[in-house]
Image: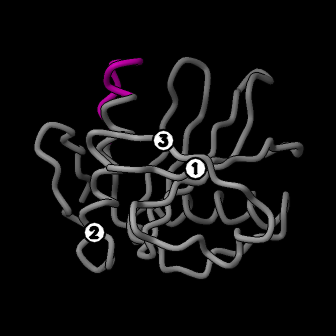
Amino acid sequence: MPYTVDFENVSTVGLESSPFAESLAGLRANEARYFRNKYGHAFTVSPVSEVPEVVDRVSRILQDEREIVIGSRPLEATAFEVDGTRMAYVFYESGLSVNVMYGIDGGKRAVGFKLAEGMEIPEELASSFKFARQKSKLAGVIRGSYFVIKGEY
């Protein structure tokens, strides 16, 4: 069942099995606030069992572009379109958030990684990416990195 993320009253709904449930919920709420403020879009997530095609697409792009396989169990995912860009998010039990931004008419195309506060950098990402820090009222300290998508998806 889809869940509209409330960034004013942060909830761990759907993320309870993560050891970083509270900080991951803050990270998810931070994304929800961004899309509400910038695009007027309500950020809605679903359990991965309801949207396996989103997880499959994100996994395929990671594999094809950088031979990355995320070792953690995906918990929630979402896909939507705003301002000519297709967005997809997957939130993992480890506290990792992966998003794919794909401009429909060429535009920007990238994969972003964000780590919930307190989690270690996953070994599948540690050797290839440097993570910058960003402070967030909702998520504490977010560490993030990205890469540009070169292929067509």
Amino acid carrying mark 2 in the image: Ala
Question: Range of the magenta residues?
Answer: 35-43
| Label placed on residue 144 | 1
Residue occupying image coordinates x 24% and y 45%: 5
- Residue under label 2, please give it: 21
Depicted 133 relative to depicted 83: above or below: below
Foreground mark, 1 or 2, reads 1
- Residue under label 3, please give it: 134
Foreground mark, 2 or 3, reads 3
Which of the two residues, 134 or 54, is positioned nearer the viewer here? 134
Name which of mark 3 and mark 1 comes first in the sequence.
3
Amino acid carrying mark 3 in the image: Gln
Q: Position of residue 33 (x, y in %)?
A: 31, 32
Name which of mark 2 and mark 3 comes first in the sequence.
2
What is the residue that sits farthest to the left in this orientation? 9
Residue occupying image coordinates x 56% and y 63%: 55
